[in-house]
């Protein structure tokens, strides 16, 4: 009986330790070179123009990530379990959770749908409709933002595409993926949509 009870308790503890909400991850996206010290949870930034990224894993005891740069040291708070994005780029990061709907890609988009997309994109560029509830994000440089409690969530940078094909988990759910763009990229795509409207 004692052996069975011990085994059950051990299984519960292992499950808690491996659950999607146990722990913290910080995805760093930067303009310039970055060096990460896992032991001290420190990121050393050398400013530049090339995109770089890294990931830090924190324990519940770790409450912040420190960034060292020519401007000085700055601590970014990581209070709760979950996945965070730290924007060390020189441009705002705009992103959202990817919706893998069942409808597939429409063969054509109506003028009304296109107008809605243009309006939504314009608002997001201005930071007007970003919200945790909608899973849409407007992250200005030198800020950190918590995205989810799911440590298995994937973050795609502005220069990589969303996977063409994804595998569902054992519950039949699509993976939790967040795609980010720079504000400049979003403005360019908005101009393309507006030009499309004129045709």
Image: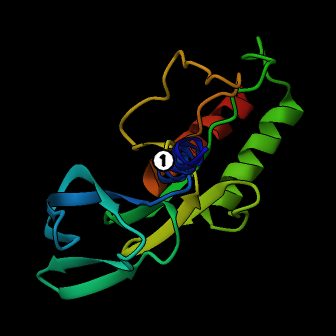
Disc tally is 1
- Residue 79 versus residue 108 in the image, above or below: below
Q: Percent position (x, y) of residue 104?
A: 74, 16
- Residue 119 versus residue 71 in the image, above or below: above
In-image side of 142 versus 41 (left or right): right
Which of the 4 quarters of the picture holds residue 192? top right
In-image side of 180 versus 123 (left or right): left
Per the image, the residue denoted by label 1 is: 14
**Quadrant of the snapshot with the C terminus:** top right
**What's the residue at 55%, 19% (across, down)?**
166
Element under disc 1: helix
Q: Nearer the viewer, residue 139 or 66?
A: 66
In-image side of 112 versus 118 (left or right): right
Q: Percent position (x, y) of residue 33?
A: 13, 58
User: From where the camera sits, is residue 91 visible?
Assistant: no
**What's the residue at 60%, 60% (across, down)?**
137
Which of the 4 quarters of the picture holds residue 142? bottom left
- Residue 63 versus residue 45 in the image, above or below: below
Q: Percent position (x, y) of residue 56?
A: 29, 59
């Amino acid at each position: 009986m004692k052996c069975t009870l011990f085994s059950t308790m051990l299984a519960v503890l292992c499950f808690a330790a491996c659950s999607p909400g146990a722990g913290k991850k910080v995805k760093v996206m930067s303009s310039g070179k970055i060096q990460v010290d896992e032991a001290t949870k420190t990121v050393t930034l050398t400013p530049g123009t090339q995109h770089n990224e890294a990931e830090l894993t924190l324990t519940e005891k770790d409450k912040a990530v420190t960034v060292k740069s020519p401007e000085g040291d700055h601590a970014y708070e990581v209070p709760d379990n979950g996945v965070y994005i730290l924007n060390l780029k020189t441009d705002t990061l705009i992103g959202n959770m990817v919706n893998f709907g069942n409808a597939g890609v429409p063969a054509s988009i109506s003028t009304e749908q296109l107008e809605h997309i243009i309006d939504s994109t314009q608002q997001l560029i201005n930071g007007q409709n970003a919200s945790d509830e909608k899973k849409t994000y407007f992250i200005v440089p030198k800020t950190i933002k918590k995205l989810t409690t799911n440590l298995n969530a994937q973050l795609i940078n502005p220069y990589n595409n969303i996977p063409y094909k994804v595998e569902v988990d054992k519950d039949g759910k699509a993976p939790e993926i967040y795609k980010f763009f720079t504000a400049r990229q979003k403005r360019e795509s908005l101009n393309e949509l507006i030009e499309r409207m004129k045709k």
